[in-house]
Image (cartoon, rainbow, N blue to C red):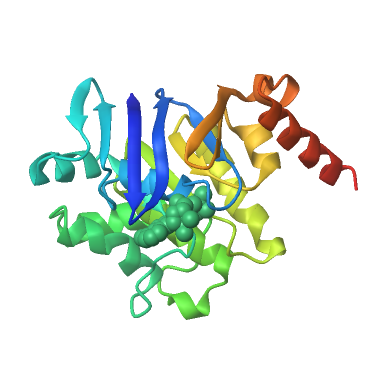
């Protein structure tokens, strides 16, 4: 469904992505793991055209694009098929939960207000916030705010949702409620590409793991295989270190 090949990106003299390729099939939950500074966020941003890759090919639903000179029109068309959930939720502070979810539908997609409100309420119900339509972000916990952000993503009916460390800004007690919403989505067959440090989520929910370091994919494998029988020395030591942490 979505494939990128040989994506490169440099900031000044810093090569952040050195030829990254990955593939997501419909219904896949792909977990991108790797230490801070590996280029995970940059990769997601390039895939969603929030950042312009220096080079790279994208194939989306069978159509091929050059990521460094894609037209504005194609970019807008592809963005409509995707949604992005950020680490810090990126909600409008002066809008209610429901308004945050409907805003993009009404403004960018020209959905009639009444219909947008119906879709928005349904999306908020789905993430367990049926009683919070009229709450402002400051009246919600971090976990609730991130669930609003997930509802906003769902409301656009995307083919794939990108998540960039969706729980890393949350207090430990609030992580579970967000992961549980994501797990439900995965079980319903939503296609997701998730940068995460939540190893439990990667192990139990993802179908594939892409392990990155220093701007390259060190290893990409089905989840079981990655954790049970990593092939590269680097992935072996990563898996060993997390299992030591788990046993502490
Ligand atoms: N806009 C930017 N300008 C300059 N350097 C950047 C920019 N964005 C990211 N970087 C650098 O690129 C490297 C990879 O960053 P990032 O993609 O955020 O990694 P990760 O998400 O894996 O932690 C880091 O060294 C970071 O400082
Ligand atoms: Mg990051």
Q: Position of residue 78 (x, y in %)?
A: 21, 39
Q: Position of residue 114 (x, y in %)?
A: 20, 60
**Direction from residue 135 to residue 6 in the image, left or right:** left
User: In the image, ligand 1 is in what quadrant?
Assistant: bottom left
Is any part of residue 241 visible from this angle? yes
Q: How many marks?
A: 0
User: In this rendering, is residue 196 above or below 64?
Assistant: below
User: In this rendering, is residue 128 above or below 235?
Assistant: below
**Direction from residue 48 to residue 132 in the image, left or right:** right
Q: Nearer the viewer, residue 134 or 60?
A: 60
Q: Residue furthest right?
A: 248
**Direction from residue 200 to residue 102 in the image, left or right:** left
Residue 227: which quarter of the image?
top right
**Direction from residue 58 to residue 193 in the image, left or right:** right
Say which residue appears at 61% left-offset and 47% top-offset: 35
Is any part of residue 86 visible from this angle? no
Question: Split into 4 quadrants, where in the image is the N terminus?
Answer: top left
Q: Position of residue 127 (x, y in %)?
A: 50, 53
Q: Residue furthest front?
A: 13
Q: Nearer the viewer, residue 7 or 192?
A: 7
Q: Position of residue 79 (x, y in %)?
A: 23, 44
Q: Nearer the viewer, residue 248 or 79?
A: 248
Say which residue appears at 65% left-offset and 57% top-offset: 175
Q: Nearer the viewer, residue 50 or 205?
A: 50
């Amino acid at each position: 469904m979505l494939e990128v090949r040989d994506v490169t990106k440099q900031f000044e003299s810093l090569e952040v992505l050195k030829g990254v390729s990955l593939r997501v099939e419909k219904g896949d939950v792909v977990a991108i793991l790797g230490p801070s500074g590996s280029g995970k966020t940059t990769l997601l941003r390039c895939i969603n055209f929030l950042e312009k890759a220096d080079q790279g090919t994208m194939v989306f639903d069978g159509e091929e694009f050059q990521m460094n000179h894609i037209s504005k029109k194609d970019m807008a068309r592809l963005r409509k098929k995707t949604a992005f959930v950020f680490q810090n939720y990126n909600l409008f502070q002066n809008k209610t939960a429901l308004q945050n979810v409907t805003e993009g539908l009404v403004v960018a997609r020209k959905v009639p207000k009444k219909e947008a409100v119906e879709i928005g309420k349904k999306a908020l119900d789905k993430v367990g916030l049926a009683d919070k339509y009229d709450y402002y972000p400051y009246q919600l916990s971090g976990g609730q705010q991130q669930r609003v952000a997930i509802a906003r993503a769902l409301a656009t009916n995307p083919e794939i949702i990108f998540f960039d460390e969706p729980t890393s800004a949350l207090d430990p007690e609030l992580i579970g409620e967000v992961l549980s919403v994501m797990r439900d989505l995965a079980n319903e067959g939503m296609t997701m590409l998730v940068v995460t440090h939540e190893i439990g989520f990667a192990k139990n929910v993802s179908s594939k793991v892409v392990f990155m370091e220093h701007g390259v994919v060190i290893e990409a494998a089905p989840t079981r295989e990655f954790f049970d029988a990593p092939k590269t020395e680097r992935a072996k030591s990563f898996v060993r270190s997390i299992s030591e942490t788990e046993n502490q």
